[in-house]
Amino acid sequence: MGTIRIVCLLSISAAMVSACAAHPEPIIDLKGVNQVVFEQDWAECKGYSEQVKIEQGVAKGAATGAVVGAVAGAIGDHDVARTAGQGGLIGGTKSGLQADREKQKVFKRCMSGRGYRVLN
């Protein structure tokens, strides 16, 4: 699979993840919350969630999916390049969405751990 095809695959997967990602930020009940402390906690929790690298998940998933697709194409006597591309797209998108969910969980757990009522 050529470099241009891989770059296109990763770009498509990243775009699909961005388009399909769930609500990126938690909804917090702010009743009785000190706004200054809240903003500081928000920024710190956001920093922790940024440690989850969605791009790495997309790249790994795309590579794994491409290999699986190529093998399936070879076994099934299909166009190997096409099945590799399809597998890469599916694998990259799935892994990217999983990484996005993990990022959101980290953020929400951090805010909950600081005593905020996370509503979603």
Image: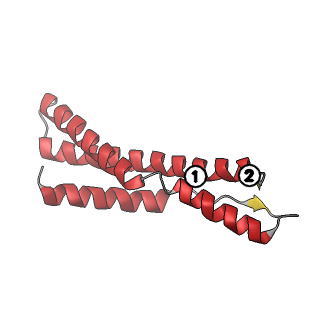
Residue 71 in the image: state x and y as whole percent. Answer: 17, 32
Q: Closer to the observer: label 2 or label 1?
A: 2
Figure colour scheme: secondary structure
Res 37 quadrant in image: bottom right
- Residue 63 visible in this rendered orientation of the protein: yes
Q: Residue at x 75, y 71 (%)?
A: 36
Name the amino acid, label 2.
Answer: Arg
Report crowding for label 1: few under 14, some 14 to 19, many 20 or more residues within 10 A (C-alpha).
many
> For numbered disc 1, what is the local secondary structure?
helix
> For numbered disc 2, what is the local secondary structure?
loop
Report the disc number at residue 39: none
Name the amino acid, label 1.
Answer: Gln
Q: Residue at x 66, y 63 (%)?
A: 42
Residue 21 in the image: state x and y as whole percent. Answer: 51, 57
Left or right of 64, for residue 27: right
Residue 32 in the image: state x and y as whole percent. Answer: 88, 64
Report the disc number at residue 114: 2
State the residue in front, 100 or 87: 100
In this rendering, the answer to whether 32 lies above or below 76 is: below
Residue behind mark 1: 104
Residue 57 in the image: state x and y as whole percent. Answer: 37, 47
Q: CA distance from mark 2 to mark 1?
A: 16 Å
Report crowding for label 2: few under 14, some 14 to 19, many 20 or more residues within 10 A (C-alpha).
few
Q: Check whether the beta carbons of the residues at disc 2 and disc 1 lie within 8 A of each other.
A: no
Q: Residue at x 46, y 62 (%)?
A: 19
Left or right of 107, for residue 87: left
Q: Residue at x 45, y 61 (%)?
A: 18
Dot 2 or dot 1, earlier in sequence = 1
In this rendering, the answer to whether 23 lies above or below 96 is: below
